[in-house]
Amino acid sequence: MSKTQRVTLTLPADVLAQAREASQGNLSGFIAQVLRDHFEDQRLAQLRADLIAGAIANAEEDLEIAQAFRYAEDEALARYVPPYIEDEADIRTTPVLAE
């Protein structure tokens, strides 16, 4: 049994001319790739919509978890991030002007 099937399409003349030019002699392969790309775009759009819906649905629970573990973030900052000294920052970022 063949993995390909013959179909008949009715296309506007200008669209067919553009497709033949873009296909570089392989119209069937070109149309197959266009359809694959279209279906992949639809799949990705649906995946994105599902991810957004899931994030919205879980937003309150995620916020509660983040707040419950806020102490861990504060502890990590205190332990591993050096303190910010404003005077030192001014000294390092102030350009030296030539007189």
Image (tube, rainbow, N blue to C red):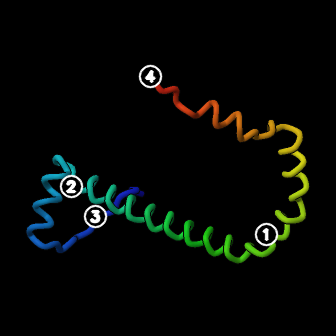
Residue at image coords 45%, 22%:
98
Q: Is residue 44 left or right of residue 17?
A: right
> Residue 39: x and y, percent?
43, 65
Say which mark, if any, is on residue 63: 1
| For marks 2 and 3 on the same chain, the one whose residue lies earlier in the sequence | 3
Tell me the SS state at disc 4.
loop
The CA span between labels 1 and 4 is: 54 Å
Q: Amino acid at mark 3?
A: Arg
What kind of element bears circle 3? loop
Amino acid type at image mark 4:
Glu
Residue drawn at (21%, 55%), measured in percent from left and top? 27
Closer to the camera in the image, 84 or 63: 84
The residue under label 4 is: 99
Of the image marks 1 and 4, the number of the one nearer the N terminus? 1
Q: Do the CB atoms of the residues marked 1 and 2 lie less than 8 Å apart?
A: no
Secondary structure of the residue carrying tag 1 is helix
| Residue corresponding to mark 2 | 27
Estimate the spatial distance between the alpha carbons at disc 3 and disc 4, rounded to whole Å.
82 Å
Q: Residue at x 38, y 59 (%)?
A: 37
Asked if marks 2 and 3 touch (Cβ < 8 Å), the reply is no
The answer to whether 18 appears left or right of 78 in the picture is left
Residue at 17% in and 46% down: 24
Of tags 2 and 4, the one toward the viewer is 4
Amino acid beneath label 2: Leu
